[in-house]
Image (spheres, rainbow, N blue to C red):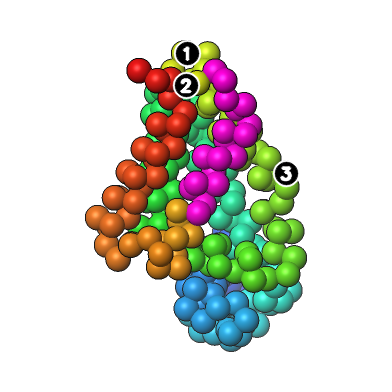
Amino acid sequence: MSRTRTARASKPLPEAEPEKRRAILHAAVRVFAEKGYHGCRIADVARAAGVAYGLVYHYFRNKEELLESVFAEQWAILINALRAIDEGPGTASEKIAGIFAFVFDVYKTAPAAVRVLILEVTRTPHSLRAGSTRETFEVAVQTVADIIRQGQRAGELRADLDPVAAAAAVLGALELSVSGMVVGLVPALSEQHVDRARRVVSDVVLRGLRVAA
């Protein structure tokens, strides 16, 4: 085999680069959750991702941009899930219950990511620049408000409720219940605990939204 062909064979494929970036982001989530944003270094992230120290800087200018990218990725996942639930089948109540199921399932499968989002977004200056912007929050609220309007048109949910205010209440209940699990106020030591919390919170929210029998 010629030297030219050997060099071409050993050169990383361009398609591999997004995978490296994702690996770094996922490692950053684990490190931020374990050590906290301010307690970790880029070297810690590189070590957890199994990549060279300099490769982290190839994709991210600094630690702040890395955290912002984590926020942006997680917000994108949430928004896409809300839209899929909104556009999918089911009654409004089933869709709202589906939102709670999705978020609580994320907590069960990726607690580190949820921990970073809940804790670091309140501790880190300028964190709202990435993903967690007013525009992103507005998309989330309006998507849930659309589900509530569907329920109101079907006579399933209370017509006297303002859809936007009700949507903000749904998302607020969701955020605070997950925050309670993160900080240890709401028991979440097992999947059974998490499922119990989901049932309680979604039941309380839906009881307030539904038309009285």
Mark yes or no: residue 6 visible.
no
Q: Along the line of sight, which residue is nearer the eye, 18 or 131?
A: 131
Relative to 29, is 173 above or below?
A: above
**Of the two numbered discs 2 and 3 in the rendering, the one whose residue sits closer to the viewer:** 2
- Residue type (three-letter) at the residue carrying disc 1: Ala
User: Disc 1 on helix, strand or loop?
Assistant: loop
Task: From the viewer's perspective, tell me whether residue 118 is left or right of residue 181.
Answer: right
Q: Residues within 10 Å of mark 2 (few under 14, many from 20)?
A: many
Report the magenta residues as a range. 159-176
Can you tell which mark lies on residue 78?
none
Residue identified by numbered label 3: 135
Q: How crowded is mark 3: few (under 14 residues within 10 Å), some or many (20 or more)?
A: few
Relative to 186, is 125 above or below?
A: below
Query: Residue 98 lies in what quarter of the image?
Result: top left
Residue 37 x/y as whole percent: 60, 77
Relative to 187, is 135 above or below?
A: above
Residue identified by numbered label 2: 157
Residue identified by numbered label 1: 154
Q: How far apart are marks 1 and 3 (CA)?
A: 29 Å
**Which residue, as the protein is rendered here, is positioned at the far left?**
192
- Residue type (three-letter) at the residue carrying disc 2: Leu
